[in-house]
Image (cartoon, grey):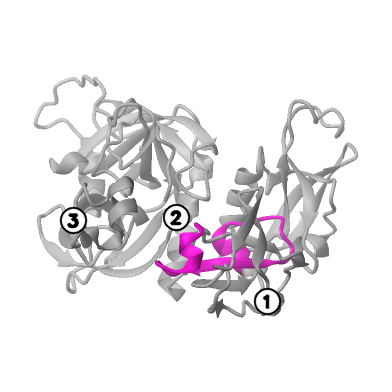
Amino acid sequence: MRLPARLALGLTLITLAFAAPARSADQPDPPSREGITLTFAPLVKKAAPAVVNIYAKRTVKTTGPVFEDPIFRHFFGELGGIPRERVQRSLGSGVILRPDGLIVTNDHVIKDAEEITVVLSDRREFAAKLLGADERTDLAVLKIDAGAAPLAALPTGDSDALEVGDLVLAIGDPFGVGQTVTMGIVSALARTSIGVSDYRFFIQTDAAINPGNSGGALIDVKGRVVGINSAIFTQSGGSVGIGFAIPINMVKVVVAGIASGGHAVRPWLGAGGQAVTAESFQALHLERPVGVLVNSVRGSSPAEAAGIKVGDVIVAIDGHEVDDPEALRYRIATKAVDAIVRVTVSRLGHESDIEVHLAAPPETPPRQPTYIEGRVPFQGATIANLNPALAEEIGIEGVEQGVIIVDIRPGTIAARLDLHVGDRIIKLNGTSIKTVNDLIAAGKVKVDKWQVSLAREGQVINLTIGEN
């Protein structure tokens, strides 16, 4: 996962100066929200056993810094160094969501792990099984077998009910020093400019986040988990009091999908667009810049069936305001696949509520994954027909059809040409490519040079490649 240079993955807890009056031995537990300001001890005693430490072990191959230098490799090639295996270990946190040992953590904590060990707060250790991971939300689900006795599990809250200023606690294992609890407040909601995952919609808190806290719990003052700690904003590698957590409403949907079928299935709206800006809102007859201006509606989609049209502005989903495309994707992604949602649409200045029956993204046309061989620019790439299900998986919006690169084998022509997974092939030698069969046919034509047009991250790339 590529992150902005100023973002660091890993989480921890901010140690705020918090003075509490001394408690006598017979002082009762605080009975109310007001009373809990005196101490968080009763809350932590119930919540802490449901937060675990996660140790992941993976083997990586390295040839040493000299042989990895691109200039050295230019002159001496790939055989300049002998690969060596090195065991890499990582530390993170996790949250027990079910008494039978179902645990959620961050995908980046366990990614490519060969062994995963879960350590409970009572120091018992268990080998964990990976039930599934969802890289797009940076979430993973683990399962441990701790015997017949039920484990402590955290109840889940409603992240949509959070308000800026609410007190929250973060629990995890920063830097491996042991389970730590810190306190902060909700600093902001619906942060969508944080490039940590594809579904960018985060709770911001001033609870400090440091390496080792990734996957830990952000809980409210009733002991309910409202977020999974995921990242920090940093300039130095340490916490500066700006941390981000994945909202629990997103977590619940992903966990349910993985626990039942091994992967997350998100509902499909079939409409996409761009954020309404300060320059465009008046022309759209809006009172202020808010919503998503629809610029594409997929044929036979839930959006088309409900009557949503290009030029409409989607301003809310089930009463929750939508500020940009990331917020729209989040609101849809937290719904059940077959849910009926209320979409508030502004059309020529008139607002109306439209009921949309969501559905799973269809596999139409069939993907037809095909490995390309021969002396062609795409040799070594696996390509597929783009359809709504594939587009959702790889995060492409607003494209009706096309051919996408879904895999590239190292050492092949496609790899040497620096083609990327996710590249959409537009043309080959002047022939428009709309299906896998189009590309196969175009690749059989004998030419001296290949003319290739690709779409990558909103830009068109044109390549001229000699056959030899």
Distance from Cα at disc 2 to Cα at disc 3: 28 Å
Considering the numbered disc 3 on the image, is that residue within a helix, a strand or a loop?
Answer: strand
What crowding class fits label 2: few (fewer than 14 Cα within 10 Å), some (14-19), or many (20 or more)? many
Residue at the spot of label 3: 88
**22 lies left or right of 431:** left
Taking the magenta stretch, the answer to whether it contains residue 393 is yes
Q: Nearer the viewer, mark 2 or mark 1?
A: 1
Of residues 139 and 85, which is closer to you in this image? 85
Taking the magenta stretch, the answer to whether it contains residue 145 is no
Residue at the spot of label 2: 251
Q: Nearer the viewer, mark 2 or mark 3?
A: 3
Three-letter amino acid code at disc 1?
A: Lys
| Mark before the other along the chain sequence, 2 or 3 | 3
Considering the numbered disc 2 on the image, is that residue within a helix, a strand or a loop?
Answer: helix
Three-letter amino acid code at disc 3?
A: Gln
| Mark before the other along the chain sequence, 3 or 1 | 3
Residue at the spot of label 1: 446
Q: Residue 157 at what x, y percent from top left?
A: 44, 48
Judge whether residue 255 can be spotted in this image.
Answer: yes
Q: Which residues are magenta?
A: 390-418
Query: Residue placed at 59% from the left, 63% from the top?
Result: 466
Distance from Cα at disc 2 to Cα at disc 1: 51 Å
Three-letter amino acid code at disc 2?
A: Val
